[in-house]
Image (cartoon, rainbow, N blue to C red):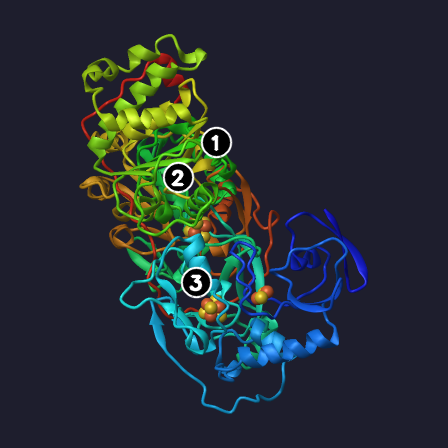
Amino acid sequence: MGKIKINGKEFEFKDGETIYEVAKRNGIFIPTYCYHKNLRIVASCRICIVELKSPKSQILTSCATLCKDGMEILTDSEKVLEERKNIMQFLLLNHPPECPVCDQGGKCLLQDYTYIYGNTFSEFKYEKEYKKYDIGPFLRFYPELCILCERCYRFWKEELNEDEIVCFGRGYKKYVGPAQNKEILMGFSNYLIDICPVGAFLDNTLSKFSVREWDLEEIETCCHFCSLFCEIKAYRRKKSRTKAILGGKKSLPYKIYDVKYKNDDGIICDRGKFGKDFILSEKILKKAKIKNKWVEINEEEIISFLKEKIKKYAPESIGILLSARMGNEEIDLLKEFFVNEIGIKNFLLIPGFFDSSFNLMKSDFKIEDVEEKTFILNVGYDFFYSHPVIGFEILRRLRKLKGEILPAHFYEYPFKEKLPFLFSISYQEGKVKREANKFLLTNFKNSFNILKILFSKIYKEYGVKKEIEDDFLNSWEFLRKIENLNKQKEFEEIINRIKKSKKLIVIYQDFIPFEIQKLLYSFKYINFPVKILILRYSPNTEYFLQKKFPLLNIYDFKNKIERGIIKLVIFIYTNPFFDIPYEGFSNLIFDKCETIIFDTFEGKHTEISEFVIPLKSFYEKDDFVMDNLGRIKKIKKVIESNRIDLKEIILKLKGGNFEEIYFEEKIEIDLDKDFEEIYIYPSLYKFGYEVKFSESLKKVF
Ligand code: SF4
Ligand code: SF4
Ligand code: FES
């Protein structure tokens, strides 16, 4: 603690704070390039220099100088401004004057600071050095624009623990770029665009060369490509700019130009960033299909058709197959209309395992749970790829707790008592493998057996929580059968490690076999502090399960179709050929039942069905969602389309008046171009094991 003066005003500082941090906290502007609050300080760019007046006159880099009691600092003295001018000249040494044709123009720190601090001429007369690199399908890399702040390199090394971005050469010959012969790791490559203060890394998707920063307006909404629902800002063209650019036409382009985390602290993954262009896919539905004919979208016609169709069937004969790729209000209305009003009881939620017993299985994990002496048990697929941002946060936190920047490809770390520990039983090689302390690549069956042994050992050590103790052991018949399997040393090692931990965190995806899910969830009932993180396949599953729909699992649903009980299947936001790759299941539905499809994208299901109703995508509607950690978030319409709003349709079927509920200004659309979707395909498997649950355990599932 102490006090410093900045530009004549006195400010308090905490131990370990730099001059830059104190200035920033108190609203005093100091320019920076290489500084980034999540990265190591390298003080390479020098633009943040300030003048130290007292105790002795000196020029210092503010990002790298710790405060000392009694310091007097000037941030914009004549000496500082003169020095910054020189620094700008050096930074622009190899930089071509390309602002008019650079996508970063208008949001570039080099441009801004050149304008504020720079010269209008350069004293360096020699040829500028240009080098060129291509980098992946989504990024363009212009090394000649680089000012060598090393943010990209440090992010890659320190935050991702990878080594594809490197610093080459020294001194004047130094440059930064992707290592040759190495494919850049997809996952967070988009962050290079945002972390680079200039335009060296730029977006290579449809947005390139199409818009300027000042033409855009931002809408706060959520990404919807996974159940984390990261809060983002999505950028669309301002109406005023559109008018000028499109020669007075009133229509706005149907396009999202950029997507970023909602503030500077956060990060989004490549799926969130580059997936924004899915709305331009040729596969997006633009027409409705009624009685096997593709027709223009006409809401009245659709409603009268639906009324007529649904009336024909008894509620027991109707099955609804849906994903939770929808908002809370949509889910509420579906429940109210289809369950409460019509009385339908046959709901199948993808990926297909859920039945009513799953309603209580929910996560209680928070990122702060990853602390010293925690043991993380991860089962399933690589969570860094399935749910990137939470994967990134977990691995980042683990690394920070371990207090080191770990070398890449380092598979096993020595047991250190206090450190958190990550044990991953995975069906997939990947990033988690490289970061785990222990990693086991195996299949479903083996993982199930291993978990049973692990469970039984922990159970024996700690017992179960009092309220479910009575018949718990009897329900786990396998415990007795595996008495003889106790020899494995690895288990002893793992068990010892768990015993030395103060908390167990269990992480898995909800699209692994349900026997394994139930077994993993059972860890929660052992008399030991356990936190659970269930990563969802279908984004709004957390909210959907809370609404307690009458759910059937895939096997019961199939059975009802085979027995001729279900005769009409309504699909909502799902393509079963895509979401449920269970051989014969989708064909069975289309062979035996009438179908109605509500979806945004065409596919085999829309080809076969006689009735298709195109629905709005997440970027085209207002609603709320619940993220994987149980937090409610708002989604907001970014672009408008003439596709059908599910809420509107249901309210009209119910006879309600939707226009009074919400209103958003209409924008015309202008569809063009194509885009490759980025999705992860789920797997659906069932194998011959059955975990028998006791009556008291059944209550908790
Ligand atoms: S590419 Fe960008 S982030 Fe990387 S060193 Fe150059 S200027 Fe810095
Ligand atoms: S982690 Fe999920 S919600 Fe977040 S940006 Fe990526 S896909 Fe979107
Ligand atoms: S920001 Fe301080 S030296 Fe670069």
Cα–Cα span, label 1 and label 3: 35 Å
Q: Quadrant of the C terminus?
A: top left
Decide if residue 422 is on the left or right side of residue 229: left
For label 2, the residue is 535
Cα–Cα span, label 2 and label 1: 12 Å
Q: Marks 2 and 3: in contact by CB < 8 Å?
A: no
Q: Which one is in front, 87 or 328?
A: 87
Nearer-N-terminus badge (3/2): 3
For label 3, the residue is 153
**The CB of the residue at mark 2 lies under 8 Å from ligand 2:** no
Disc 2, SS? strand
Residue 573 visible in the picture:
no
Place of residue 598 in the rendered image (x, y in percent of width and height, measured from the top left): 37, 48
Tell me the kind of residue under disc 1: Asp
For label 1, the residue is 364
Disc 1, SS? loop
* Label 1 packing within 10 angstroms: few (<14), some (14-19), many (20+): some
